[in-house]
Amino acid sequence: MTDPTDTVAAAPPLRIAHTFELRPAERAGARALMDAAFDGDFSDEDWDHGLGGVHAFVRAADGTFLAHGSVIQRRVLHRGRSYRVGYVEAVAVRPGLRRQGLGGRVMAALERVIDGAYDLGALSASDDGAPLYRARGWRLWEGTIGTLGPGGVVRLPDEEDSTYLRPVAGRPLPGGGGPSGVLVFDWREGDVL
């Protein structure tokens, strides 16, 4: 295997594919990147959340995944309206290659998908990832976060300082001029956001 750090200067191509287009080796390679990037703290449920949408990824010449992210559709309720949201999942850059533009390339591709297909973008950022999203114009949601669970709306206070939205040109963010109120995300197994 070649050293993946040798390939960044050569600007390896970025590929965009829907989940159904990924070959088994590509799925396995992207999943392995998640384990490497998150030090084993990326569950099978977390991986499942990133499937069923559009993936953007960069691989080295030998096939090693250098960076990955996906955008999937979710529904979010806000003040009586349901929004079709492009939700960003499974964003990772191989350790040792961070802060070299790979994450930005992946996000640019995912943002094009969001801008063309959704009412807005949303994601839950780690402390390490938040600066990338803020620099790209994502805005921290300053209101309440919840989910529509089997028993009704459940508040998610732990997500209230890490949920970011991306406005799409010509479409206002929920809350009008500024993020406020309650965003209620659809329910899913594992970590809801």
Image (cartoon, grey):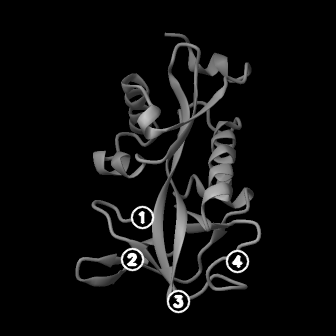
- Quadrant in the picture for the C terminus: bottom left
User: Earlier along the polypeptide chain: callout 1 or callout 4?
Assistant: 4
Mark pair 3, 4: CA separation? 14 Å
Q: Which numbered disc covers residue 193?
A: 1
Q: Which numbered disc covers residue 172?
A: 4
Q: Among all residues in the image, which is located at the extreme right?
A: 170
- Whether residue 89 sits left or right of residue 104 in the image: it is left
- Whether residue 170 sits left or right of residue 76 in the image: it is right
- Whether residue 132 sits left or right of residue 182 in the image: it is right
Residue for point 56% across, 15% down:
3
Q: Which numbered disc covers residue 43?
A: none
Marks 2, 3: nearer the viewer: 3
User: Earlier along the polypeptide chain: callout 2 or callout 3?
Assistant: 3
Secondary structure category for the residue under label 3: loop
Q: Identify the residue under disc 3.
A: 79
The percent coordinates of residue 103 (x first, y second) are: 63, 42
Q: Badge 3: how crowded within 10 Å, few (<14), some, or many (20+)? A: few
The percent coordinates of residue 153 (x first, y second) are: 34, 84
Identified by mark 4, the residue type is Pro
Q: Identify the residue under disc 2.
A: 156
